[in-house]
């Protein structure tokens, strides 16, 4: 009997060790995980959950399977490890299409850049559906759970969804933290906390780039002037001189601007070279023919999929401290519930297995379209492009950072 008991204990220990190595068992002490003991549910079931002290909502990236997705699951586990307080947490994963941006190839790109309003597309419809469903989860918390605090985490398209949902709901001081990893809606001068990540302050994401292109198209005297402005903006992005005011206007008009009361609670992480949130250099180099989409996919995929461990530790440390500092005896300021517009689920949902290839498609298509218009309409602009090639070549010879 003793041998049997000892044997089962050894087997149990080995199993726990193996599962821990594969990421299936949290490494946090049991006492830390107590508040997170409830199982995550999908967003359509959130209204049936009992209220808690904290609500954690995770939003996966494009093409990831249902649930949190690996990156957001890592964020959740990191917060569990840092849990150092009393209180309960209910967990929700956002059930939304997470459609690939490559579906934008089905749309006439001239319409995508110039038509008002922007034509319906599977990708942006997916982001709208996600934002509307996330707003519904937040509004349910606001209505039912007066003392509940909100923590959200999103990766890639999931970060874009959170950005849009915050613009819809304005959660105020109910929001403890919104963690945005590899956000396509990242842009220069964005009012967020950036404690992790290696991207410079000039980094601009693919979503922000597209919204900026549309803003330039809408404010230009004619189509030719618009194309010239788009080309110049791409050059300015590469050189870190893009107008922050222009980008802010574009984000606000598209409904993707984070509300001012959420600035201090929004944590953005963008790694240098991640095309999804730091698109300027690869776009500029593709524009002048210095590289190809395939080469950029191969080069940047590990970066985009690398939001874990030490890369996000400072952000998780700060969010852990913010959670620990919440005084549960104080009731948050009541927040008016804003009714979000109803978004329709796209008719065709595609979930590719290659997250990054889908994520960079929008920028590649925009750059290709603008470059096609530039090359097809003016010899003068062709000469300008040659000059720009020479300038880009000189910068590459100098190496990064040598020109200040």
Image: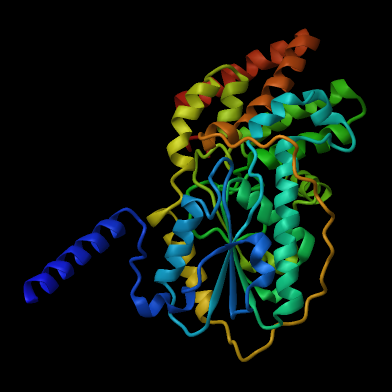
Q: Position of residue 40 (x, y in %)?
A: 54, 64
Residue at 43 percent across and 63 percent down: it is: 77
Question: Quick one: which residue is furthest to the front in this view?
Answer: 1
Q: Is residue 203 above or below residue 374?
A: below
Residue at 53 percent across and 20 percent down: it is: 292
Question: Quick one: which residue is furthest to the right in this view?
Answer: 221
* Quadrant in the picture for the N terminus: bottom left
Q: Position of residue 18 (x, y in %)?
A: 25, 56
Question: Quick one: which residue is furthest to the bottom in this view?
Answer: 329
Residue 241 seen in render: no
| 211, 280: nearer the viewer | 211
Residue at 61 percent across and 91 percent down: it is: 329
Colour scheme of the rendered structure? rainbow
Q: Is residue 136 above or below residue 238?
A: below
| 208, 132: nearer the viewer | 132
Which picture quadrant has residue 172? Answer: bottom right
Residue 372 seen in render: yes
Q: Position of residue 20 (x, y in %)?
A: 30, 60
**Left or right, 13 with reference to 45:** left
**Left or right, 230 with reference to 80:** right
Q: Position of residue 184 (x, y in %)?
A: 63, 44
Residue at 46 percent across and 68 percent down: it is: 79
């Amino acid at each position: 009997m003793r041998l049997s008991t000892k044997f089962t204990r050894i087997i149990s220990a080995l199993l726990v060790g193996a599962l821990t190595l594969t990421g299936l068992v949290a490494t946090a002490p049991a006492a830390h995980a107590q508040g997170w003991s409830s199982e995550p549910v999908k967003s359509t079931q959130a209204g049936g959950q009992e209220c808690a002290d904290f609500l954690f909502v995770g939003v996966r990236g494009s093409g990831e399977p249902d649930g949190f997705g690996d990156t957001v699951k890592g964020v959740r586990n990191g917060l569990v490890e840092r849990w150092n307080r009393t209180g309960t947490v209910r967990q929700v994963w956002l059930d939304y299409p997470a459609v690939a941006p490559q579906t934008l190839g089905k749309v006439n790109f001239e319409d995508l850049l110039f038509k008002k309003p922007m034509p319906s597309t599977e990708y942006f419809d997916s982001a709208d559906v996600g934002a509307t469903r996330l707003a519904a989860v937040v509004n349910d918390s606001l209505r039912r759970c007066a003392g509940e605090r909100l923590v959200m985490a999103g990766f890639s398209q999931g970060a874009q969804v959170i950005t849009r949902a915050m613009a819809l709901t304005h959660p105020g001081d109910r929001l403890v933290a919104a963690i945005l990893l590899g956000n396509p809606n990242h842009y220069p001068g964005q009012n967020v906390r950036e404690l992790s990540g290696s991207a410079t302050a000039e980094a601009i994401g693919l979503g922000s780039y597209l919204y900026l292109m549309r803003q330039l198209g809408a404010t230009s005297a004619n189509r030719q002037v618009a194309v010239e402005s788009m080309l110049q903006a791409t050059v300015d992005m590469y050189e870190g001189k893009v107008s922050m005011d222009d980008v802010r206007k574009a984000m606000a008009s598209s409904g993707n601007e984070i509300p001012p009361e959420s600035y201090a609670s929004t944590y953005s992480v963008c790694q240098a070279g991640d095309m999804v949130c730091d698109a300027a250099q690869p776009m500029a180099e593709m524009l002048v023919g210095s590289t190809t989409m395939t080469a950029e996919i191969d080069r940047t995929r590990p970066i985009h999929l690398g939001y874990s461990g030490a890369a996000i530790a400072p952000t998780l440390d700060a969010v852990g401290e913010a959670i620990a500092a919440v005084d549960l005896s104080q009731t948050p300021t009541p927040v008016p519930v804003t009714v979000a517009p109803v978004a329709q689920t796209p008719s065709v949902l595609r979930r590719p297995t290659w997250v990054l290839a889908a994520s960079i498609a929008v920028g590649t298509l925009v750059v290709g379209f603008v470059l096609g218009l530039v090359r097809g309409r003016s010899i003068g602009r062709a000469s300008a492009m040659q000059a720009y090639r020479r300038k880009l070549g000189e910068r590459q010879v100098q190496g990064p950072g040598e020109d200040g």
